[in-house]
Structures are given as C-alpha cells and as structure tokens.
Image (cartoon, helix red, strand yellow):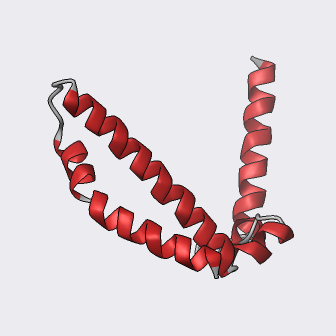
Amino acid sequence: KRRQQRARKKAEKVAAETSSKSSPHSPSKEAKDNTPPAKRETADDPATAAKKRLRAVNKKLRQIEAIKKKQSEGLELDDGQKAKLAGEGTLLAELEKLKIHAQS
C-alpha cells in the first residue's frame, strides 16, 4: 500500500510539473521537430520526394497486380480493390512522368 501511495504522489508531482511548464495552447519544444537534422534537410529535397513517390507508385502497382491475380482466380473483389483497379491508368501515367523526371 505504501508503495502505491508513493508512486501515486510521484506521478501527481510529475504531472503538476509538466502542466505548469507548458500551457495547453503552446506546443512543447520536443513536439516541434524531433526529426534528425539529416532527415530535415532531405525532406524538402524534390529529388528525394520524387524517389519516395516512385516507390509508392510502384507499391500500388504491385498491389494492383496481386488484385488482378485474385480476380483471375475467380475471387470476389471488394469496393476498395475495384477502386484500385480503376486507378491503374492514372498510376501508370504518373510512373512515366516520374521516370522521365528521374532521368533528367
């Protein structure tokens, strides 16, 4: 019982200290930007953003291929899968643009 009381008092003390240091309307310094400096520099880099988008588009196209395989096996597709299949043309066009951008 005593341990529980000490733990409770300690938790209340910590909570009181943290609430008095920062107001609820202003974010704390830790919440502002925890990303390492190296990652912060590349986050705004257009080449890095294009590479990320290229990976994302390729992943979606792989998912579409898996959906097509399921469809050819006769499985029923849900609405989300049908929507992905419908967006294949857009993804292929974007893939071409990204490849052209990567080459230049």
Residue 79 location, x and y as percent? 17, 44
Q: Residue at x 41, y 70 (%)?
A: 94
* Number of marks drawn: 0
Q: Is residue 62 above or below residue 104?
A: above
Q: Indicate the quadrant containing the C terminus: top left, top right, bottom left or bottom right.
A: bottom right
Residue 80 location, x and y as percent? 23, 46
Pick the front one: 53 or 18: 53
Quarter of the image for residue 39 reads bottom right
Q: Is residue 99 visible?
A: yes
Quarter of the image for residue 96 reads bottom left
Compared across the picture, whether 29 is left or right of 87 comes to right
Residue 49 location, x and y as percent? 61, 72
Pick the front one: 45 or 54: 54
Q: Residue at x 29, y 37 (%)?
A: 67
Compared across the picture, whether 11 is left or right of 87 comes to right
Q: Residue at x 70, y 79 (%)?
A: 45
Compared across the picture, whether 72 is left or right of 44 comes to left
Q: Residue at x 43, y 44 (%)?
A: 62
Q: Is residue 26 visible?
A: no
Q: Indicate the quadrant containing the N terminus: top left, top right, bottom left or bottom right.
A: top right
Compared across the picture, whether 69 is left or right of 6 comes to left
